[in-house]
Image (cartoon, grey):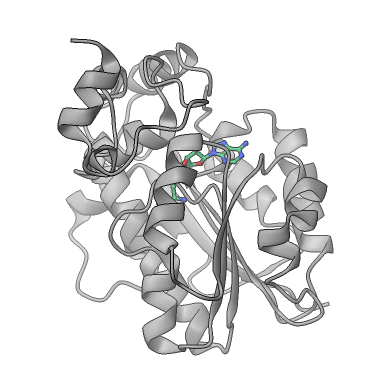
Amino acid sequence: MDQYEDSRESVPFSSFAPPPEEAQTDIPNAARMYDYYLGGSTNFAADREAAEAGSAAMPHAREYARANRAFLGRAVAYLSAQGIDQFLDLGSGIPTVGNVHEVARPLDPTARVAYVDHEPVAVAHAQRLLAGHSNVTITLADVRDPQAVFTAPGVAGLLDFSRPVGVLAVAVLPFVPEQRTALEVIAAYREACVAGSYLVLSHISAISATERQVADAEEVMARTPTPVRWRPPHEITELMQGYELVDPGLVPLPSWHPQDAVAHEEIEVSNAYGAVGRLTR
Ligand SMILES: C[S@@+](CC[C@H](N)C(=O)[O-])C[C@H]1O[C@@H](n2cnc3c(N)ncnc32)[C@H](O)[C@@H]1O
């Protein structure tokens, strides 16, 4: 069975439309591997194989993905409570449960959300999901090219950068492995924002994972077109420079504004940190 046949069987949106032509469904893809970890079905055999190899290398990949997604939801709700009504979601991924607009709009029906991803399947899927929604857009762009993002109609036509914006860089900066490049990219978004704007950032980082597991997990991703790098906490903190961190600062994802008591094991297996920062200048 070829990949396309396989995808038609297992991917709900493929029953409505084929994957976009530019989607390379026979090459593992980070967005679709993440979707698989979250229990989604917008993934193909090559993605599932690579994701299983990732799980073998780093046993708690699923727990990481779930902790990350839950952090995103809590952070968006927090921003909404602070009056943020415009969101720029960088590396938004394949829409699954708890998308930014699904969290923000019940809290503020006027909220505007601009999603950006460079993965054609994620974008095609989002286009279908968002059809008929006003004030929610999806843009196919590379977040490492901020000018392309700012000038895209889905961003320029939706967000007003003269007012505070909530920028989300949730689980996307591992795909920008070089620290100086990541700092430049994040600075470009910071500089476009006015005081009162926020940055939500999460990043994979060893908590319970051993050095060997990290190296093996990086090796799995090195075989895909989008290698990743795990960062130590001090490098993640550096990415938040220019922002005043909201309490409790940079912490393991489950510990950021938890709704319930957090078990120690939950923290250990999350293997990622998150923070929310506010621009005060
Ligand atoms: C692990 S997923 C995270 C999805 C979502 N932000 C979340 O946290 O649930 C990472 C996403 O970033 C996207 N991505 C990676 N590098 C990117 C880049 N340079 N430009 C745009 N998107 C990128 C991938 O396609 C993928 O959808």
Q: Nearer the viewer, residue 135 or 239?
A: 135
Residue drawn at x 22%, y 20% is 5
Left of 235 or right of it: where is 71? left
Q: Nearer the viewer, residue 220 or 5?
A: 5
Quadrant housing residue 75: bottom left
Q: Is residue 278 above or below residue 58?
A: below
Left of 269 or right of it: where is 221? right
Residue 250 in view, yes or no = no
Number of callouts = 0
Residue drawn at x 67%, y 57% is 240
Residue 260 in view, yes or no = yes
Image quarter of the C terminus = bottom right
Left of 260 or right of it: where is 107? right
x and y, in percent, of residue 44 in the image: 28, 25
Residue drawn at x 54%, y 45% is 233
x and y, in percent, of residue 220 in the image: 38, 15
Residue drawn at x 69%, y 75% is 197
x and y, in percent, of residue 84 in the image: 59, 83
Q: Is residue 243 above or below residue 274?
A: below
Q: Nearer the viewer, residue 205 or 217?
A: 217
x and y, in percent, of residue 1 in the image: 18, 10
Q: Is residue 240 above or below residue 194?
A: above
